[in-house]
Image (cartoon, coloured by chain):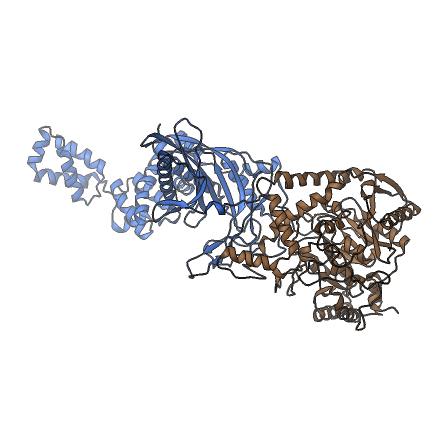
Amino acid sequence: MAEPTELGIAEARDQLAKGTLSARELTESHIAAMADATTLNAMVTETPEIALAMADASDARRAKGDAGGETGALEGIPLAIKDLFCTKGVLTTAGSHILDGFTPPYESTVTANLWQAGAVMLGKTNMDEFAMGSSNETSYHGVVQNPWRRKGDNQTLVPGGSSGGSAVAVAGRFAMGATATDTGGSIRQPAAFTGTVGCKPTYGRCSRWGVVAFASSLDQAGPITRSVRDNAIMLGAMAGYDPKDSTSAKIALPDFEAALTGDVRGLKIGVPKEYVLDGMPVEIEALWQQGIGWLRDAGAAIVDISLPHTKYALPAYYIVAPAEASSNLARYDGVRFGLRVPGEDLTEMYKNTRAAGFGAEVRRRVLIGTYVLSAGYYDAYYLKAQKVRRLIAQDFRDAYEKVDAILTPSAPSAAFAVGDKADDPIAMYLNDVFTVPANLAGLPGISIPAGLSDEGLPLGLQILAPAFDEETMYRVAGVLEEAAAFAKAPEQWWRGGS
Amino acid sequence: MSDLVEGATGPWEVVIGLEVHAQVTSKSKLFSGAATAFGAEPNSQVSLVDAGMPGMLPVINEIAVQQAVRSGLGLNAKINKYSVFDRKNYFYADLPQGYQISQYLQPIVGEGMISVDLADGSSRDIGIERLHLEQDAGKSIHDRHPSKTYVDLNRSGVALMEIVSKPDMRSAEEAGAYVRKVRAILRYLGTCDGNMEEGSMRADVNVSVRRPGEGLGTRAEIKNVNSVRFMQLAIAYETNRQIDILEDGGSIDQETRLFDAQTGTTRPMRSKEEAHDYRYFPDPDLLPLEFSDAFIEGIRTTLPELPDAKKQRYMDELGLSAHDAQVLVSDRDIAAFYEQVATGRDAKVAANWVQGEFFAQLSKAERDIADSPISAGQLGGLIDLIADNTISGKIAKDVLEFMFESGRDAADIVAEKGLTQVSDSGAIEGEIDKVIAANPDKVAEFQSGKDKVLGWFVGQIMQATKGKANPQMVNQLLREKLKA
């Protein structure tokens, strides 16, 4: 029998149901693997006691016969939680110094849904500070290491970001799945960099209540897993209407797993010409073509489409997101919680606290956001960006008149080395070029591992779908996953005292 | 009509616009379920949303929205079927989110108009620019500790309606009348209790001066004035300050000022370097408000009769004078009290009693009509005793005083104190005969044509009967006997 940590959620679910595996055994093996992986720095807080208590409770429920069914989709499944989700009684830092010691007296809706479904919490994952970053280098808790390395090279690579810790926990086999959030690509890009499956559902599918806000009109929670099926199972448990989030969609929750029919015959898949970038590595282009071939072979029709405003997406994103962030982060002022650095008066306390508490990238974005909202600049930046946003959404609406889903690369490169882009924000921001449009338009997207680069690093393909049509997204992703047969895992070089 | 202010170099016209902040009558806050009751222990009515905790989200209170629409309809204003919540960003210790959720470019209510009533009996139309919903901030308390500030977040997130007038007022009197009228309308509607002492209503006052016929001058905004009297003092001070500056060749700074009730003066609130750029933008946590016509009309059908309509009805149907009608409709509670007294009784008599003796007694007792020691029914009972000749009007005034002291019914007091009017002509005639017999000289005076002596005779009879004799019968019988 395989190591419990090698199991997928769907397989573990079956073994737990059969009684050949207990939640405690499953959880203990993951706790051990997590303890063995501290080198990767994927966790901010490990909660083994909580995990074991939850696992025992799950086993007890199962013994009593009231596990399973609709509320028990993740009964006994150990998960890691991005440190952006508020967890009752457990330190929640958002990767920032400014939330030092912040232990929320409340549980986010998404995590509460997961616990309701029987899941087990292993701990909180490292992330870029306030989810601002594409390499997990902006965390106050330090860089997260990608478990993947280039062939014949021990250089430390970034796991992508901002959900780097979540992606690494799943890729490194010490969590069966992890929650993550995606504002401009923060689920899909790290999934691509780590060979995992990461889905950003439609804006409004998962409640934002209790998730530390970065850019409220773009933020959306989603799962990172090792398979498309696991992803569909986990999203089903995370999502749902929440009256506490006014932007949460009052719309029925489909059975995402049931959407995995393995059949894309007759579906029309769009390939947008604007996603061909100058200077994009040949292997990314080749993988994309490979993906197109797989889907065509599976019976889908490939349609060339145009999303004409794509080139304006990244600039618009880097106005809208910092604008909202500059306002969302105003509450971190040293008055009520987290870090406080005293000063002579209130203003000085604000300055001291926020200067010490926020890292360089967060400060940069707060400054950009404050600037684009200020009197005299608002129309030229913020308002213009909102217009661009509407045009991008319209591009997609027009495209979905012709196609059922869209296939693109997930990221313009494979994982890069720590330090490579840390001093060049523009180069860093370009990582999100393929993922940002879906956030601006509020549409669902998923990255699946589809192959390895010449250097042996995972590369991802992205499937985009119309709003609230995650079923089509999963259906296409499932077929692509099967065709790609990406059954590869990183060498576990960090284990065994190395 | 001239409200011009005479300066050293000629007349000036004052231009006043008001932003009235009215707390929405609602059990919970604008975006959270926390309670809003006045006077609770500090920080005892604070939800996670009100405290600006990470990840917390606002959810609109539908009652507050209905109240704003209701208020807009009461102000004869246009209801905007699409409106947007914006964030107004600034840092302060009692503003936990670091922004106030308000409405900036697209408020819930647009232009309207109300008629305000001036002391000389005339009225004037004042335009409403807009009404929007917003959150209140918490309260900073600076005087409890030498170096620290305490923050009470009970008010944080409480729903306010900001009602912005057009710059249509030309005197402190008009500004006062406007605030009183807005307050009256909101109280009739039940959308704001109008309690200025508890902070349920306060005003920002925009004042500028200009030469008659010229364009608008630069204005100063006096923040957070919490009584009509202070507002009028602030306007008077600010008017003179601005005229003095302009007449000395200076110019007015557009700035925010505070009124100091101790000194009766205004002073700048912050320096120019601290001037805020609020960086308004649509709140991404909230959807726009969208109404159907049916929603608005549904609220319109529940509106009560408002002061202007009520005044007209009192004049047309009850035959009251404009002045009496005005006094009685000036407040919802007074009108309700009056209508209860007047039901089934002579409307004019009821009006006279309510605004005459009853108000005098209330004022003496230092009570509001809402906590009057006697009910409308009890005052009605007193009026009934006059109507059926049980007591005289004069005795009734004394009875009312007893009623205020004891809270008891008029009939009980009259019975206990034996104040029932003597309408037995035999008894009265007996007293008259005695007085006539004892005062032949006065009788002679009357008979020689000095009618005024009659009053002296009445006084003697009333004295002898301890005021209980029916005055009309005394008059009538006296004339008959004296002429005989």
Front residue (pair B250, A294) = B250
Vertical position of residue B228 compared to residue B139: above or below: above
Which of the chains is brown?
A
Residue B352, horizontal then vertical, whole percent: 32, 37
Residue A463, horizontal then vertical, whole percent: 82, 48
Q: Outermost residue, bottom direction?
A: A497
Vertical position of residue B257 compared to residue A231: above or below: above
Q: Outermost residue, top direction?
A: B213
Front residue (pair A212, B195) = A212
Q: Is residue A201 visible to the viewer in this orientation of the structure?
A: no
Location of the N terminus of chain B (image quadrant): top left
Residue A29, horizontal then vertical, whole percent: 79, 70
The hue used for chain B is: blue
Vertical position of residue A74 compared to residue B272: above or below: below
Which residue shows up at 64% across the image and 65% down it? A89
Q: Is residue A196 visible to the viewer in this orientation of the structure?
A: yes
Side (left or right) of A3 relative to B226:
right
Side (left or right) of B424 relative to A309:
left
Residue B243, horizontal then vertical, whole percent: 36, 35
Location of the C terminus of chain B (image quadrant): top left
Side (left or right) of A181 relative to B311:
right
